[in-house]
Amino acid sequence: MTTAPTIPASVAVDGRSNLRAAPMIAVRGLKKRIGPQDILRGVDLSVAAGETLVIIGRSGGGKTVLLKNLIGLMQPNEGEIWIDGQSIIGLGERQLEAIRRKVGILFQGGALFDSMTVEENIAFPLREAGERDGRVIERKIAEMLEVIELEGQQKKMPVNLSGGMKKRVGLARAIINQPSCILYDEPTAGLDPVVSDSINRLIRRLQERYHVTSVVVTHDMKNAFHVGDRIAYLHEGRIYFHGTPAEIQASPDPLIQDFLIGRAALAD
Ligand SMILES: Nc1ncnc2c1ncn2[C@@H]1O[C@H](COP(=O)(O)OP(=O)(O)OP(=O)(O)O)[C@@H](O)[C@H]1O
Ligand SMILES: [Mg+2]
């Protein structure tokens, strides 16, 4: 069996070289073609345990596709993906389920089950993982409702929730199995500034409370600077730039600056 690659010096976390040995997520030369489109053209990424990496990039650039590859919902055409030291390429559905217990994902649209109540949605991964003890399930649901600040809303159906509430329920579902890693796909998109701030605070609280490794895909630069230890810019299928929030802000590269101030978005 081969071992997980160590983080190359070029992507090691600044001043935290002790994190180099054990990336929670390592991606090498990842390529993904869908139909005639080369979506990912050789993505290299490392995320150290406990670190938060923010991925930014233009709409349609392949951010969601990248996250789906990380948990085996899509298979790459080429490249390597290592999660917590284990290669996930070619794993069967059962082994991928074990990976997905380690890596929770908040899908871009929340992706709640419409026919289930809030508490049934939140408890779904617990039941999938084989938990049958009603008291344990009840206690964990209550804990999650407290974390997402939706106490008293557990009997509601998704159709009766606001966009921000749905996102928070999706988040509770992503974290109830206490994954060591959470992938967030646009956690604040379409939400008003107050709700966005509460989601950002929630992401921070999860980092602090559960010490999770996080990958946050966002268009929202305020969000990116608020939660990210490092920021990676996905451009034309590759990581075009990565660095700390301060480094990306200081970058003289016009492509980066255009993205940061939103000109690229206007050109879409
Ligand atoms: N299941 C699929 N079938 C066909 N094409 C797909 C599929 N999933 C994604 N794509 C295509 O891959 C490209 C990248 O899509 P993706 O959803 O990853 O973009 P994104 O960077 O997440 O964009 P956004 O910021 O708008 O969410 C798009 O051209 C999209 O149409
Ligand atoms: Mg997307």
Image (cartoon, grey):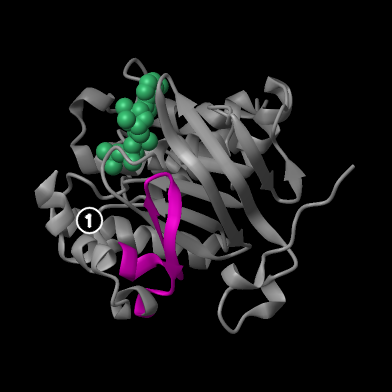
Q: Amino acid at mark 1?
A: Ser
- Highlighted magenta segment, given as a residue range: 224-246
Q: Is residue 237 magenta?
A: yes
Q: Residues within 10 Å of mark 1 (few under 14, many from 20)?
A: some
SS class, disc 1: helix
Q: Report whether residue 251 is seen.
A: yes
Label tally? 1
Ligand 1 is found in the corner quadrant, namely: top left
| Vertical position of residue 124 compared to residue 47: above or below | above
| Vertical position of residue 118 compared to residue 67: above or below | above
Pick whichever, 2 or 153, lies toward us: 2
**x and y, in percent, of residue 45 in the image:** 56, 55
Looking at the rendered image, the quarter that the N terminus falls into is: top right
| Vertical position of residue 58 compared to residue 110: above or below | below
Q: Is residue 36 left or right of residue 12?
A: left
Looking at the rendered image, the quarter that the C terminus falls into is: top left
Pick whichever, 231 or 254, lies toward us: 254
**x and y, in percent, of residue 146 in the image:** 39, 51
Kindly indicate the quadrant of the structure image that contains residue 133.
Answer: top right
Q: Residue at x 22, y 60 (%)?
A: 259
User: For mark 1, what is the residue?
Assistant: 196
Q: Report whether residue 152 is seen.
A: no
Residue most extreme to the right: 1
Q: Is residue 233 magenta?
A: yes
Residue most extreme to the bottom: 15
Q: Residue at x 56, y 58 (%)?
A: 213
Q: Residue at x 58, y 68 (%)?
A: 11
Residue most extreme to the left: 266
Q: Residue at x 15, y 51 (%)?
A: 265
**x and y, in percent, of residue 52 in the image:** 49, 63
CB of mark 1 near ligand 1 (< 8 Å): no
**x and y, in percent, of residue 93 in the image:** 68, 21
